[in-house]
Amino acid sequence: MPGRWRHRRAAAPFLAALVLILAGPGSNRPAQGATYPASAYTNVTAFDTCDGTPDTISRSLKTLAQNGLAGLGYASSAFETTGFTKARFLSRTPADEAVYVHSHGDQYYGPYPRMIQGFRDDGGDCSQAVVYATEVKARRSSAAHLVIMSTCHLAEAARTAGQPTMSEAYGIERLKSTVSGSPRGPEFFLSYVGLAYTADMLKFEGRFWAYVGRGRGVGDAFTLARATAGMSAATVPDWFGEYVYTGRPDGGPDCTTCL
Amino acid sequence: MRSPWTRRAATAAFRPVLSARLRVMAAVAALAALGIGAGGLRAASDGPVGATPGDGVAAVAGWRAGETDQLPLDLDRAAAESLAAGGVAEARRLGLPGVAAAASRALDRTIRLAIDTIELRDPDGHAAAVLYRDAASGRLRSAVRLAWTPDLDTPRLDAAAATRAAGRFLAAAGWAVPSTAPLVSWDDGMDAWRVRWPRRIAGVEAPSNGSVAWIHRAGQLKALAVTESPLAAAPAQRIAPEAALASVRGYMARVGLDRMAGLAIEAPVLRWAEANDFIDPGLPDAPALELRLAWVVHLSYLPPGWTERHEVELAVDAGSGALIGGTETA
């Protein structure tokens, strides 16, 4: 399609522009040398105590995410059980440049008949408050760089018209640079459509972080993980944002296999 | 001088690293015994490596999150060049771009197999496509197009045409096209048609295995993946589904699942299933190499305080009646 901005072909000018934006005097990003906060949350209690099955996948996914975010240059903190409360999550929401959540996600009534995307906190017990996309959106003033909702349903469109999806709550439109016809900027959202099974999520996310760790851009990492993870047909990941984005908060060093 | 407490703390912190290193060393030793990584693989006439149980690769310790997922293996220059040349030829058959290629070999601990990676690049040196082959058999496991050109998006294909294209690519990669009807759907994440043939062995499905092709709107290959895990020997005597259900009910009583509200248990279904750490958290994150014939039981229930149903699948070995793994919804 003539004139379309597409991955790889336009990656060089995009990344150059990204560096200028991040370094420019008008930028509201932290200056060089600043830290880029990121949070990785995992709901251990829900998949262990509450549902009656023993679980190690929650912590494994958190380990992968925390290491992956740190490798991209974020100051990555991780929270689980009593450390992963709704209050803590929302208190960190305004500053986080990257977020990872592994939990139950759905479109919850808030209240009926309005449905809002959200996920459950951990809190160390099974009461597990829902964190709604509307609550996230109210606390964000700029787009996040990298958001991964390792949950069911949060890559879906809103079921109630006018309600923000979780990606939109973080300032990431439900658009792909590869099909929208325009660059999306340094942002990437990843989640799942419908029900997602934890054994598949571990396979897929393990691959995703491994490819990112080897210098692939997040778009290529998604594609390669999708094609090599060996998931069952039931688990379907999706993404929005910029295909050629490195996932890094500082724009560099450039992805070694994107350009 | 460190206090004893400090030494203990340091030792405790070091233990996982040491344990991981020992597992890695065992993996390399197992591969070396097979000739993988020390001058290449055995000749094909020697029989497949890594495709049958008990050949050594199966004994390689599985990956755990936080550990390295790949261990580079030696590949001499002549073998690398041969692999790269073969990769370019294979890419041509699949219509994938790339004018030059580099090859490498590694033990992939997430699947417990030695894998050859062949990366194709465009004339400017950008990644254009990647091929992954089973190092032992030389067969293609995955092929992925990374380069984009405008012609890929010209809308031409419907689901039926995408299915025909997928079959052609599967055949071009040297795999038999299953005679069964595939599952065809549009995959937003891949921006392509997904055509999937689940693997069936004597009529029994292996949900984690199968042949999948993602086809661009205009008919070109976006990605191809064929997963055919080795199979454990089928049990000489198969337990009845009622016995599998009894095993599941026993487990449910032990962990308290039987007390969940709204509990619904579906009839057991025979599957070739992956054994994993769902029942035994002490096992590695990587599932077992071999698939096992199992009765799979699907449950759903409402954990306390929840409004949405939770779904769980449990796999019961069809011979021993032991629970060997499972999964649950997030």
Image: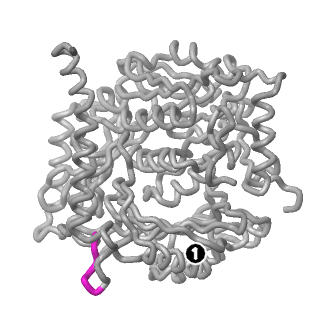
Q: Return the residue at label 1.
A: B166
Q: Residue at x 56, y 29 (%)?
A: A74
Q: Residue at x 40, y 43 (%)?
A: A198
Say if the magenta span includes residue A214: no
Q: Is residue B59 left or right of residue A204?
A: left
Q: Is residue B155 left or right of residue A134?
A: right
Q: Position of residue B241 (x, y in %)?
A: 20, 58
Residue positioned most to the right: A3
Near-viewer residue (B202 or A88): A88
Say if the magenta span includes residue B49: yes
Q: Secondary structure at mark 1?
A: helix
Principal secondary structure, stretch drawn in magenta: loop
Q: Position of residue B68 (x, y in %)?
A: 38, 46
In the picture, the quarter occupied by the N terminus of chain B is top left
Q: Residue at x 47, y 32 (%)?
A: A66
Residue B163 location, quadrant: bottom right
The subunit carrying tag 1 is B
Q: Position of residue A139 (x, y in %)?
A: 67, 17
Residue B184: tell me if it is visible.
no
Q: Amino acid at mark 1?
A: Ala
Relative to A252, residue B187 above or below: below
Near-viewer residue (B147 or B323): B147
Residue positioned most to the front: B1
Relative to A24, residue A222 above or below: below
Stretch in magenta: B45-50
